[in-house]
């Protein structure tokens, strides 16, 4: 009779990083993003960071790079590269902030909005596939816990939560 495998997180001989919540969360994000990187992104000449920036700008038009970085969790350099790539592809428009000429604000162009709408359905389908095993209550609980953890990280790093303001 075949013996059931014990999950790495429950084994004493598992590497310590495999028993951590953060490792599990990063793994889930990477596995969830893989189909995008291997197919959808390539077919639309769009990187994962660029997709995340598009999604933020759809929800928050006129955002500055710092707000985009906080909303995506990407570092400033990744956001800067994504913005430059999106702008050169005609997917976003950047203009100086009238209140602070040192920074630029970004909006989706019509082409950027069309691309977002095209990919949104696939992104939502992937989310359903990943969260489909959770009940509505569990999804709400997980969302609330992740939001609380995100707020704690922002506070520990001395950053303002742009969505709480």
Image (tube, rainbow, N blue to C red):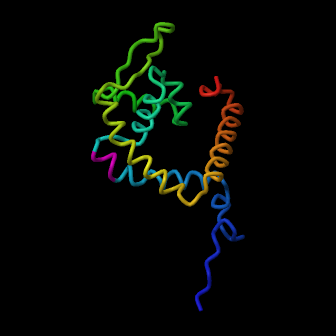
Q: Nearer the viewer, residue 81 or 125?
A: 125
Task: Judge whether 59 appears above or below 23 on screen.
Answer: above
Q: Taking 2 as reference, is 119 left or right?
A: left
Q: Is residue 46 magenta?
A: no
Quarter-wise, where is residue 131 in the image? bottom right
Quarter-wise, where is residue 135 in the image? bottom right
Residue at 30%, 47% in the rendered image: 42
Task: Judge whether 19 appears above or below 82 on screen.
Answer: below
Task: Judge whether 105 appears above or below 12 on screen.
Answer: above
Q: Position of residue 44 (x, y in %)?
A: 28, 42
Residue at 36%, 42% in the rendered image: 119
Q: Position of residue 23 (x, y in %)?
A: 61, 54
Q: Taking 10 as reference, is 77 left or right?
A: left
Q: Image quadrant for the C terminus?
A: top right
Q: Position of residue 35 (x, y in %)?
A: 39, 54
Q: Nearer the viewer, residue 137 or 149?
A: 137
Residue at 63%, 61% in the rendered image: 18
Task: Judge whether 86 appears above or below 146 on screen.
Answer: above
Q: Which residues are magenta?
A: 39-43
Q: Position of residue 53 (x, y in %)?
A: 44, 33
């Amino acid at each position: 009779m075949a013996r059931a495998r014990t999950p790495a997180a429950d084994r004493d001989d598992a590497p310590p990083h495999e028993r951590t919540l953060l490792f599990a969360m990063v793994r889930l994000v990477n596995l969830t993003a893989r189909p995008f990187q291997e197919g959808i992104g390539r077919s639309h000449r769009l990187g994962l960071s660029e997709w995340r920036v598009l999604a933020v700008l759809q929800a928050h038009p006129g955002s500055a790079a710092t707000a985009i970085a906080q909303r995506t969790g990407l570092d400033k350099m990744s956001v800067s590269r994504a913005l430059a790539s999106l702008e050169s592809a005609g997917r976003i428009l950047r203009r100086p902030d009238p209140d602070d000429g040192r920074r630029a604000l970004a909006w989706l162009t019509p082409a950027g909005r069309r691309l977002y709408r095209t990919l949104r359905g696939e992104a939502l389908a992937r989310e359903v596939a990943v969260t489909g095993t959770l009940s509505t209550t569990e999804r709400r609980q997980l969302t609330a816990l992740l939001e609380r953890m995100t707020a704690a990280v922002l506070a520990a790093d001395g950053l303002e939560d742009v969505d709480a303001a």
